Amino acid sequence: MSRWRELQEADPSLDSPFLSPEFTVTVGELRDVVRVAVIHDGPDIVGFFPFERHPLGIGKPVAAGLTDAQGLIRAKDFELDPRALIRACGLAVYEFDHLVAGQPLLDERHERHPSPIIDLRDGWDHYTEELRKHSGKTYKSTLAKSRKLQREAGTVRHDYATTDLEPLRALLGWKTDQYRRTGRTDRFAQRWIVELVERLLATRSESFAGVLDMVYADERPVAGHFGLRTRTTLAGWFPAYDPHFAKYSPGLIHHLAMAERAAEQGIQVIDMGRGEKEYKDKLKTGQLEVAEGRVARIGPAAAVHWVMRVPARKTRATVLANPLLHKTADKALKTYGRLRTVLQG
């Protein structure tokens, strides 16, 4: 893993815990579809390509559907043919939706999407100054709601980077309820994802760790987040809060508390991940770029994959890009979620 980490840390575009060797190894312990291609240039190891191999030679990123950064870890000056790579891996297609910048897998046909960040490279004070300029109303109201929460619910405290399983289970419970309320698929209905999160929580080193933090009011958990970090980047992953405290905007209270503590611990960037969310717009002070698409070899498996996946992906992109369509689709999903909750209740 030392060579992998050496290549990763030499390229800022690869500074995501989802591209760290520990993440791939941990997922691989739980899913037998995980593979890693080791790329040599003569006697030298110049790259690693983590992927999942599915039926018909369909390749996907490790933990596809969960990760906000995907790609090849390689020496910056090493070039390769993407189709030759997937051929060598026994793949007909490699599809992705969060491919990071600077990848040889990337071409002009692939769709680009912003991935908003909280930029802490100049420190916490500089971040709050920027927040006051661009989201001053949000910043002031969040501080006011935090004080109100303390007055009405009890002493507010923030527990950062805890390894306790009890708050993790509370967080996953909130997240499951959120998925159901909004009509989304409950990821934590899959046991391997719960096991993955628990194992990553127990993983801790200078270059990689699971990070769980929780805001409490009078010792009652209010809001929290589980994510992953490298030395300098914290990847947002599973934020959630107790709906009982919704009027206090607990998610915003938590994110500001998390960002302050993360900055104290040397985190320079919090990557909130691709996707349109109101809280991301309010808190962001910059953005990265990720791409969606596929690399394919000519053949029947690639043709079948195109028919099954590409039109649906393009339709989804059209909906997300149109505010009216997006709002209508989101409303429909929430209605479905409420009906499903009633029927299951």
Image: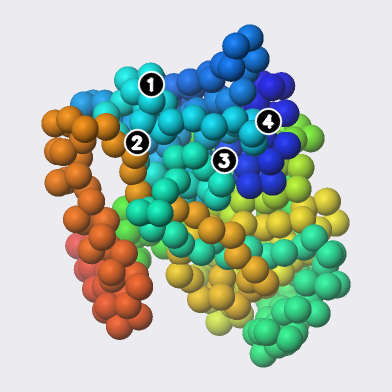
Residue found 64% across the figure and 36% down from its top: 76
Residue found 19% across the figure and 55% down from its top: 311
Up-down relation of residue 36 to residue 150 (above or below): above
Tally of numbered tags: 4
> Tag on residue 94?
2
Q: Nearer the viewer, mark 3 or mark 1?
A: 1
Q: Quadrant of residue 30?
A: top left
What residue did someone put label 4 on?
7
Up-down relation of residue 82 to residue 133 (above or below): above
Whether residue 313 appears in this view of the structure is yes
> Tag on residue 159?
none
Residue 146 screen position, x and y as percent: 71, 78
Labels 3 and 2: the sequence-earlier one: 3
Tag 4: amino acid: Leu
- The answer to the question of whether label 4 and label 3 lie on touching residues, with beta carbons closer than 8 A, is no
Judge the density around disc 3: few (<14), some (14-19), many (≥20) Cα neighbours within 10 Å: many
Q: Is residue 59 left or right of residue 81?
A: left
